[in-house]
Structure formats: structure tokens, C-alpha cells
Image: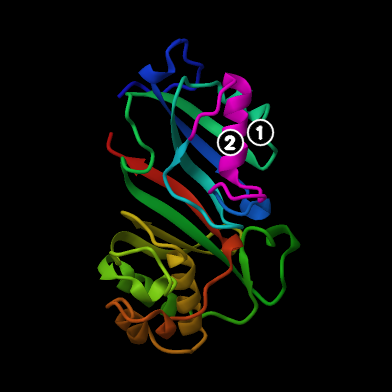
């Protein structure tokens, strides 16, 4: 693996190099990461920007797909082709997407399959008054939340569990076990509650259903023991509501080395 670089590659043959991009985006006005007919997506905008510069369409591979309205602070993408200066890419990208780093990698690097873990952060503004400033980046919950209950639920998540209760019933997943290494609540300097979770992989809506169910428990709808029982492959109907997408962000993706 080559040393990280944010400069353009001078290699003429795009098949000789794979490029790794680090992205940040505001998911508010996107229909999610993945390209969809007649809908605005992050993938479409990024591939269009690369094509504008390289004058050819080059498909990209993403570390973790995000749903409509979900943000990313450290999304990772790979493609077969030369590394482009982030400033050059940002010059043709829309204002709600930015490339932070562009790094030449050994051929065959794959942002998805080579990832060892992903970290997400879900933010809740827990106070009586809503915040216009945070309306696109934190879920406003006006009722008090029991912080001890939130912490107890988060503690139960760490380890290897069956998360069938935390993904839609209609799913393409065939394996529901996930290995969670970090799951904890903290409070930011803005007074916002943040749920941080790191796992090998995630299922669709998994983090948002976890947060929605923990919020239910923190409202007094069930106990932390009830929550822990859901981590044994219980049906989706036994878990809580799905928290809204705008509070969630893909914070980072880790790789060997």
C-alpha cells in the first residue's frame, strides 16, 4: 500500500492504480448514496464529477451505503483510475459534497470489502425547545430521556449479537449477527446526546432502530433488560420505532494499516 497523498497522480494507465477517496457530505437533499433513476444521489454526483475531469465514466465502490437524509463525515470510496486533486474535484462537485483526501492505493483495493469496521454517530437534541441550527443534523426529542437507561442499553449492545429485531422484516440479509466493538452515549459541547457505535458491518436501518428503541426505553416504555432480550434474534415488531435519518452520520471507516 502506498503512502497517503492528496496530490494528483501522474500515472497514465488508470488500470495500474486504484484511488481511495475520503468524503464528507450533507445528506439532507440526497435520496441516499446509491444511484437511483430520476433521483439525486451522492454516487451520481461523485461519478459525474470524476467523469467531468477524466472524460470517461468510472464506477465507484463505497464503504457503506447511506440512506436518504443520512450524512457522512468520513465516507470512503474507491475506483480504478488516477488520483485527482481534491480541490479539482471539489471545484465540480455541488456544495453539499466534498472530497477531503485522494490517495493512490495498490491495484485491487476495495473500499467495501477491505474495510474492517465502520463507526456511526447518532445525535439527539434532548431539550424542550427545538433548534433551527441543528434541525438537519440532530433528532429533536422534547421529552426528558433517562440517561442511565440509555447507557444500560448501549452496554448491552457490545459483543456479537443477532440484530434481526433492528432491521426491516423485508430484507436481503441472510446473516443477522454483527460484532459490535463500541456502543456508548456521550454528550457533546453543544449539549447534544451522541450515540457512537462501531461494528464490522451494519444492516439497513440498524442504527436508527437501535436509537429509536433505546429512546423508547428511556421514555419508560420497557426496561434495559427488555432491550437486551431483543438482541437474541427477536422479530422486528418487538423493537421500537425507527429514528429519523437526519440525526445519523457515518463517522469513519477503518482499514488494516
Task: Using residue 51 as the reference point, say whether residue 62 is left or right of it.
Answer: left
The residue depicted at 67 percent of the width and 59 percent of the height is: 136
Task: Using residue 73 as the reference point, say whether residue 40 is left or right of it.
Answer: right
In this view of the protein, can residue 71 be seen by the observer? yes
Up the image or down, 86 lies above or below 156; here it is: above
Graded by Cα atoms within 10 Å as few (under 14), some (14 to 19) or many (20 or more), the crowding at tag 1 reads: many
Q: Which mark is residue 93?
A: 1
Asked if disc 2 and disc 1 are in contact, CB closer than 8 Å, the reply is yes
The residue depicted at 32 percent of the width and 70 percent of the height is: 157
Q: Which mark is residue 46?
A: 2
Look at the image and tell me in which quarter the N terminus lies: top left
Q: Quadrant of residue 12?
A: top left
Report the magenta residues as a range.
34-59
Cα distance in 3D space between marks 2 and 1: 7 Å
Q: Earlier in the sequence, mark 2 or mark 1?
A: 2
Q: Which mark is residue 22?
A: none
Find the residue positioned furthest to the right: 132
Task: Using residue 100 as the reference point, say whether residue 119 is left or right of it.
Answer: left
Residue 7: give x, y in percent of width and height.
50, 18
The residue depicted at 26 percent of the width and 69 percent of the height is: 161
> What's the image's color scheme?
rainbow
Residue 105: give x, y in percent of width and height.
36, 25
Residue 139 is inside the magenta segment: no
Q: Nearer the viewer, residue 2 or 147?
A: 2
What is the secondary structure assignment of the residue under circle 2? helix
What is the secondary structure assignment of the residue under circle 1? loop
Amino acid at each position: 500500500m502506498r503512502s497517503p497523498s492528496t496530490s494528483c497522480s501522474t500515472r497514465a494507465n488508470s488500470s495500474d492504480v486504484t484511488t481511495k477517496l475520503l468524503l464528507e457530505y450533507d445528506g439532507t437533499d440526497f435520496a441516499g448514496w446509491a444511484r437511483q433513476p430520476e433521483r439525486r444521489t451522492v454516487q451520481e454526483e461523485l461519478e459525474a464529477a470524476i467523469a467531468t475531469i477524466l472524460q470517461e465514466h468510472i464506477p465507484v465502490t463505497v464503504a457503506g451505503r447511506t440512506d436518504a437524509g443520512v450524512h457522512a463525515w468520513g465516507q470512503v470510496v474507491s475506483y480504478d483510475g488516477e488520483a485527482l486533486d481534491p480541490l479539482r474535484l471539489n471545484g465540480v462537485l455541488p456544495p453539499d459534497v466534498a472530497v477531503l483526501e485522494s490517495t493512490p492505493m495498490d491495484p485491487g483495493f476495495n473500499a467495501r470489502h477491505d474495510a474492517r469496521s465502520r463507526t456511526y454517530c447518532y445525535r439527539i437534541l434532548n431539550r424542550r425547545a427545538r433548534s433551527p441550527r441543528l434541525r438537519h443534523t440532530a433528532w429533536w426529542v422534547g421529552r426528558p430521556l433517562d440517561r442511565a437507561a440509555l447507557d444500560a442499553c448501549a452496554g448491552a449492545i457490545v459483543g456479537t449479537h443477532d440484530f434481526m429485531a433492528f432491521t426491516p422484516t423485508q430484507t436481503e440479509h441472510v446473516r443477522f449477527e454483527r460484532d459490535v466493538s463500541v456502543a456508548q452515549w456521550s454528550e457533546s459541547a453543544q449539549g447534544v446526546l451522541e450515540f457512537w457505535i462501531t461494528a464490522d458491518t451494519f444492516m439497513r436501518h440498524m442504527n436508527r432502530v437501535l436509537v429509536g428503541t433505546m429512546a423508547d426505553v428511556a421514555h419508560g416504555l420497557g426496561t434495559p433488560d427488555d432491550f437486551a432480550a431483543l438482541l437474541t434474534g427477536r422479530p422486528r415488531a418487538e423493537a421500537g420505532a425507527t429514528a429519523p435519518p437526519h440525526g445519523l452520520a457515518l463517522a469513519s471507516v477503518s482499514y488494516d494499516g
